[in-house]
Amino acid sequence: MRHVHRRFRGARRAAKRELARLVTEQEAAPTPVAEASSLWGPRTTVNDAITAWKANGWSDLSPNTASDYETVWTLHIEKSIGRRRIAALTPFDVEQFLRTLKDSGLSQERVRRIRAILHRACRLARKWSGNTLPNPITDTELPVWSLTEGSDEVRSPSVDEVKAILTVARTGDPRIAAFVRLVTATGLRRGEACALRWSDVDMDGQRIRVDKSVVIGRSGIQVKAPKTRASIRTIAVDGGTLDQLRTLRRRQDEIAGACGVTLGREAFIFSLEADGLEAPRPDSLSRTFARLRDKAGVASDIHLHSLRHFVATELDSVISESQKQARLGWSTVQMARHYTDSVSAEDQRAADHMGDLFGELGSRDGGGDQPVTKPMAS
């Protein structure tokens, strides 16, 4: 508490009057605002910097990226180097920490991600401190991984393995069968397939429009535009895949009618809800695919994303590299990709080739009739 002291010379009564005046003057003065101690100083820790970055920047990240950053921070940074003061941290300390992570068995990509998070947090701390804090990450280097230490590359499944998975899928839920067939025939990312609505499918033109993706953030499912323009595209689809989608649509109309709701054009194709208004979760479909793969007797190193590698591999000898990049939505393509109202003959040839690979699995029965049941609440 602050005090005001004045020395007064005179009679007692005059002194009391002066005291009363000082009290009145003090009470009329504006209340001083206490200054908070600055966060950015010699005691600022790496965790302080990441916490501030999280409150002032993570909202600009995609939900998947923000969730991944938080996981990396919690598992690998918060209880170790995160407690260190930035001002006392040296490049040697950081490189020693990164090498410890490598020795513990973390992959090169994961250690690279950890360093990137540390570098961004310390760079922001340096800026927010008015350049009084250093960035000890700037001059550090990653450990070196030999070829034998690197993670295994994603394996593209063989045509026989894909056929086995599709055969098993067609004996079960038509929704899953159509999902796996579409991803296998087009190479769509799982989030892109989950975001497809019936309005994105042109049955007569044999094409689909891809312009959204489903991501899982801290607040749940979100449907967002992709990160790059290259991911927004219109691609051709083979007849067998479209037949399975038609069969799925008929089944969903029946289920919606049994539940007393309507399935509109904006309904998500692979939704679990009778009205189709809620997008499916990509992670749930990945787990379902893993069960199909195991039931088909396919090796466990084949994942849902492996189907995208399968498409890229199979199309190598069918279409040009630029057209393959356009079809798969890669951002490294060196040509204009503005597919809006038309699909090139080359892309149609790619769609027909993928459909022909599955032979009898592309028959027009769409997987046979399935009993219609009212979905149970989960």
Image: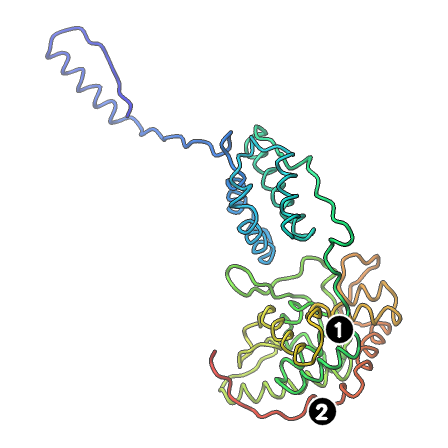
Q: What percent of the width, then of the height, locates residue 347?
A: 83, 72
Residue 361 relative to residue 131: left or right: right
The quadrant holding residue 288 is bottom right
Kind of element beneath mark 2: loop
Give, as a three-letter code, the residue at label 1.
Thr
- Is the image coloured rainbow, by chain, by secondary structure, or in one colour? rainbow
Relative to residue 166, is residue 231 depicted above or below?
A: above
Badge 2 density bin: few <14, some 14–19, many ≥20, Cα 10 Å:
few
Mark 1: which secondary structure?
Answer: helix
Q: Which residue is tagged 1? A: 186
Residue at screen point 84% across, 78% down: 353
User: Which residue, given by chain and number where applicable, does mark 2 sit on?
Assistant: 365
Relative image position of residue 55 (x, y in whole percent): 51, 46
Dot placed on the residue nearer the N-terminal end, 2 or 1? 1
Where's residue 17, x and y in %?
Answer: 15, 16
Query: Does 83 sit left or right of 266 as displayed?
Result: left
Residue beneath the point at 61% across and 69% down: 282
Does 284 sit above or below residue 55?
A: below
Q: Residue at x 31, y 28 (%)?
A: 30
Asked if labels 1 and 2 touch by Cβ distance under 8 angstroms, the answer is no
Count numbered badges in the picture.
Answer: 2
Categorize mark 1 by other alpha carbons within 10 Å: few (<14), some (14-19), many (20+): many
Q: At label 2, which amino acid type do we have?
A: Asp
Position of 55 with respect to 158 (left or right) is left
Give me the C-alpha separation between circle 2 and circle 1.
20 Å
Q: Position of residue 73 (x, y in %)?
A: 55, 49
Examine the image and state in which quarter residue 184 appears: bottom right
**Image quadrant occupied by the N terminus:** top left
Q: Which mark is residue 7?
A: none
Task: Name the residue furthest top.
Answer: 9
